[in-house]
Amino acid sequence: MFIGRERELASLNRLYNSDRFEFVVLYGRQRVGKTALINHFIDGKPAIYFLGLESNAKQNLVNFSRSIIEYSSGYERDTPFLSFQAALEMGFRLSEKKRLILAIDEYPYVAKASRSLASTLQLLIDRYKDRSKMMLILCGSSMSYMADHVLAYKAPLYGRSTAQIRLLTFDFAEACRFFKNFSAEDKALAYGIAGGIPQYLLQINDRLSIRENIRNSFLNTASSLYEEPVNLLTQEVREPAICTAILTAIATGSSRMSEISGNVGEDTSVCSTCLKNLITLGIVRKELPYGENASEKTIYFIDDHMFRFWYRFVPENASLISRGAADLVYQRIEPHLSDYMGKVFEELCRQYLWTLLLSGKSPVNFTSLGRWWGNDPIKRQAEIDIMGEQDKNTALFGECKWTNEKVDLGVLETLTERSNLFTYPNKHFFLFSKTGFTKGCMEKARLLGNVTLVMYSEMLSFSVNTIP
């Protein structure tokens, strides 16, 4: 089952139809769907597909040779080329007269085993690009390797790619396409626990309840997701144990560097290095109050929902889970789900606002969105869930409530009061609610005239129906 990726497929097909040499660098974290995208794209097209193995150069050369020989002769032979240069040169020659896709998946595995591969590719690209009809795709999951050895200025292949595609996670509207049988609320909960990684979304069964899915996927030692975060970190970072401790600290309430460092028991320099790697992987994001750049206000949070859910609830219950007490663990988790979903709902609201803007229906043409926090005039801590500036005169302010109670007038009054900490002459307010709004809140919004009230069900319908 292939879902989504319409924009990426359109870009790949546009490059394919150019009928000249194209070199695409396709990268993204593990499980995000790179291989599925490549296989879907090359289906029905003349293509050589080669998946690199975490093995030695000889084994990869044998497999690469087999892929090329099978394409060129129509049947398998075990006689390998003598070198990667000879094998690649055959590929370039095959593409001199007709369009040919050469896709090397997990390129870092091959390049690490054969140190001269990048320079060989550089040589052959320079030699054949003006007369070749090849569409070369180099794909990799190692974000740091692709950045340092393919895209970086000092890398042999720098400046030779004609396109770069970083495959990102699905947003909520795209993720909903996996969950046709869930209720509206369960779709949000499923996204909140699985996030936007296709491989994780496929582990959620929309014919079961959210409770059953949590039990099966996170509270079951036989599940593929049970050890996924630790396994991924073991492959991607040098200090997986420290990264695990950092993620646990963030998931349980630490957000500033000093708090994280104290909780983990490591120097801030060590934590900073680990956090940088986690940010590169798209697992953690650092944030400043909207419109500010003072580094001392930097906070960190887990941006990947599956990791955030896992580190929030699994480590502290690991002993019970290992003893098969899934029902007891779920009883401990359930009272915290609504609070956990608060941050998820804020993200859904931001995604909704971007969809509104891109469809030409936003009252404020903002250029970015973020969260703001700081002190009010009497030094009380104040927060605004969403801010977005159009220019120095116009901005939007939003508040998001994932509760079973209707949003009342007090929430709107607090938001408008906090907006007075800023000097925009023109302001528009958004209130987002899971359940709805009280009569007093709706009347006040109507009187003000610059307030938009949005229920979650309306967000879901609009966002899903806007998908191309």
Image (cartoon, helix red, strand yellow):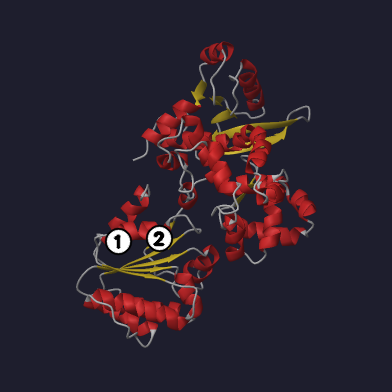
Density class for disc 1 (Cα within 10 Å; few <14, some 14-19, many ≥20) is: some
Vertical side of 347 occupied by 169: above or below: below
Secondary structure of the residue carrying tag 1 is helix
The residue type indicated by label 1 comes to Ile
**Residue 1 location (% of width, % of height):** 36, 50
Vertical side of 284 occupied by 52: above or below: below
Question: In the picture provided, is 249 more to the left or to the right than 360?
Answer: right
Name the outermost residue toward the left: 97
Q: Which residue is mark 2?
A: 35
Q: Is 148 in front, or is 427?
A: 148
Please name the residue shown 78% across and 27% down the image.
378
To which quarter of the image does residue 157 belong?
Answer: bottom left
Question: In the picture provided, is 138 more to the left or to the right than 367?
Answer: left
Vertical side of 321 occupied by 49: above or below: below
Name the outermost residue toward the bottom: 82
Looking at marks 2 and 1 on the same chain, the residue that comes earlier in the sequence is marked by 2
Can residue 295 be seen here? The reply is: no
**Residue 334 location (% of width, % of height):** 64, 35
Q: CA distance from mark 2 to mark 1?
A: 11 Å
Question: In the picture provided, is 155 more to the left or to the right than 321?
Answer: left
Q: Which residue is mark 1?
A: 42
